Amino acid sequence: MEVTGRVALVTGASSGIGRATAIALARGGARVLVQGRDRDRSEEVARLVDGDVLLGDLTEPGAADDLVTRATEVHGRVDLLVANAGTGRSAPFTEMDPFEIDHLLTLDLVVPIRLVHAALPAMVDQGSGHLVLVTSIAGRAGVAGEAVYAAAKAGLDAFAESLRLELEGTNVGASVVVPGVVDTAFFVNRGGAPVRRVPRRVSADRVAEAIVGAVVHDRPEVYVPAWLRLAPTVRGIAPGLFRRLAARFGEPVRIHGKEDPGP
């Protein structure tokens, strides 16, 4: 689907991947709706893309449906949904409190599903549209210290794969974009151990380019960087080898605080 002239709703657009995606879509000729919680940062992005701001906390009850309703009222439709808003937490699972677990699962898994549920019927009715879910390599390979985050992203992968089967013949596409470590504040705010050595960080702009490309070329999934697809492949073919490599190159996060100092 070409993005020129399309109405694009980008969640979590006040910073990081969302901000870069809003800018990339605007450069491609899309009319961008900027969703965020921080008013100042969201309005700054909206000025950059000549778009509209839709503020709100997506974890609030009914917020996803309300957002899509408000977005539709601006231009009369939503052609493209980029479900990017999310949060992370790096810590041994036993150190996470129930509130953290619930909040992470809500924002990273439940909210994107609710957004799609709200936006999809109109796309099907109009005979065109595209959905992009920003997942993570953590959901494909598992990461020590990110068990709940990885579970949420894996759930999004399964949701998207199932949804594609239902969308056959509707002219509505669904893509997942699977980044590795991205050079944004997300990986600072999540806490925990230092970011792992492999894979190297990529820029938010690079992920944004992949998102736009997934829409334009109707790609079911895109890894950023592309070689990351080797991780789930090795995991499926040689799980023992994969686990040894993950233990060597991953973050030294262990339950009970025991750490492997690494090589």
Image (cartoon, grey):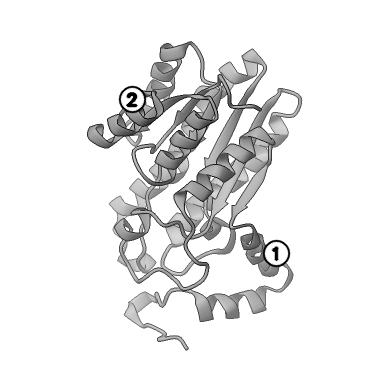
Q: Name the residue that disc number 2 marks.
A: 53
The amino acid at mark 1 is Thr
Q: Position of residue 78 (x, y in %)?
A: 51, 20
Q: Is residue 166 above or below residue 184?
A: above
Give me the C-alpha separation between circle 2 and circle 1: 40 Å
Q: Position of residue 79 (x, y in %)?
A: 56, 22
For mark 1, give the secondary structure: helix
Looking at the image, which is closer to me, 177 or 141? 177
> What residue appears at the point 38 percent right and 65 percent down from the top-left corner?
93
> What residue appears at the point 74 percent right and 69 percent down from the top-left corner?
237
Looking at the image, which is closer to me, 71 or 105? 71
Q: Is residue 62 left or right of residue 203?
A: left
The answer to whether residue 83 shows anywhere in this view is no
Which of the labelled discs sits on residue 41, or is there none? none
Q: Is residue 147 above or below residue 125?
A: below
> What residue appears at the point 35 percent right and 43 percent down from the top-left corner?
15
Residue 52 lies in what quarter of the image? top left
Q: Name the residue that disc number 1 marks.
A: 233
Q: Position of residue 205 (x, y in %)?
A: 48, 47
The answer to whether residue 177 shows anywhere in this view is yes
Looking at the image, which is closer to me, 240 or 5? 5
Q: Is residue 42 left or right of residue 200?
A: left
